[in-house]
Amino acid sequence: MDGFEARDSPLAAIFLLFFSLMSPILTSVLLGLTAAAANVFGGAIIVQKHWERSYLRYFVALGAGFMLATALVEMVPESIQLRGTSAGFLILLGYLLVHFFEHTVTPHFHFGEETHAEQFVHTHKGYSVLVGLLIHTFFDGIAIASGFIVSNWLGWIIFIAVFLHKIPEGFTIASVMLASGRSRSFAWWTSVMLGAATVAGVMTMAILRHQVSFGLPLSAGVTIYVAASDLMPEVNKEPGVDMALLVFVGAASMFVLDHFFHIH
């Protein structure tokens, strides 16, 4: 058809509008799958006895600093801008929700390799850890999608914060299941479940994207909890100052990325 241009077609215009609306969601889904793969890889590390695992502590330390900086400097202010002062209540709710399932319902939980098999003589204790981490990882997905709904910058910075603790997360749940007397195959599949919960969180927020003013502050509270109450205690157990200094490196990295890549 002579002189026809795609931009003159109403169908093309609708397609371009649809793509522009969906691209943040598509990006968050792809990155949610990437984060899920990190969960699965973390589970494989402990299932495969010969794989090196000492480097996981570096992810924990860097992740603690980066997540804390991301939550307090990026997620909390954006949540208040979206929801006003009521965002504070939702942030607190997200924090307490994870505390309830990870450290109230679950009597013994910490990030890293589980070496206290006596704590998991009763199988239900291992499953309580699984439930707590499933809720936690679901909100990891909520956080990633909420970020991209608000802006590409926020989505990417939240993804990095989430990704940094995903491998230790998968390692942790597989370790707990082994301590509970479950098979290596079952232990690995629980890390797959965490990955699936992350993707489910992304998809839920994609469907409910108009509720981002709820999703972002809730996930901000979860992120603060994971950084301050899950990861930081593991850093503080390490002797010397190396791991403690990595927390500062993690926090500083967020500001470096903000300086060079965030268009204000």
Image: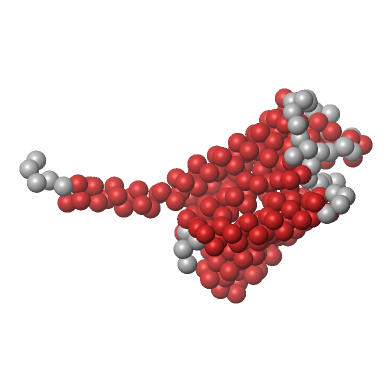
Left or right for 163, reference 187? left
Furthest residue to the left? 2
Decide: is 240 above or below 119. Answer: below
Residue positioned 82% across, 46% down in the render: 109
Q: Between residues 131 and 81, which one lies in front from this camera angle?
A: 81
Give the image location of residue 170, x and y in percent. 70, 38
On-image quarter of the N terminus: top left
Residue 250 appears in the picture as rendered: yes
Image quadrant in which you'd find residue 95: bottom right
Q: Between residues 239 and 84, which one lies in front from this camera angle?
A: 239
Furthest residue to the right? 118
Q: Between residues 174 and 99, which one lies in front from this camera angle?
A: 174
Residue positioned 47% across, 55% down in the render: 152
Residue positioned 55% across, 66% down in the render: 78
Residue positioned 65% across, 68% down in the render: 89
User: Total number of numbered labels?
Assistant: 0
Give the image location of residue 64, x and y in percent. 72, 54
Give the image location of residue 49, x and y in percent. 78, 26
Q: What colour scheme has been applied to the protein in the rendered image?
A: secondary structure
Decide: is 188 above or below 76. Answer: above
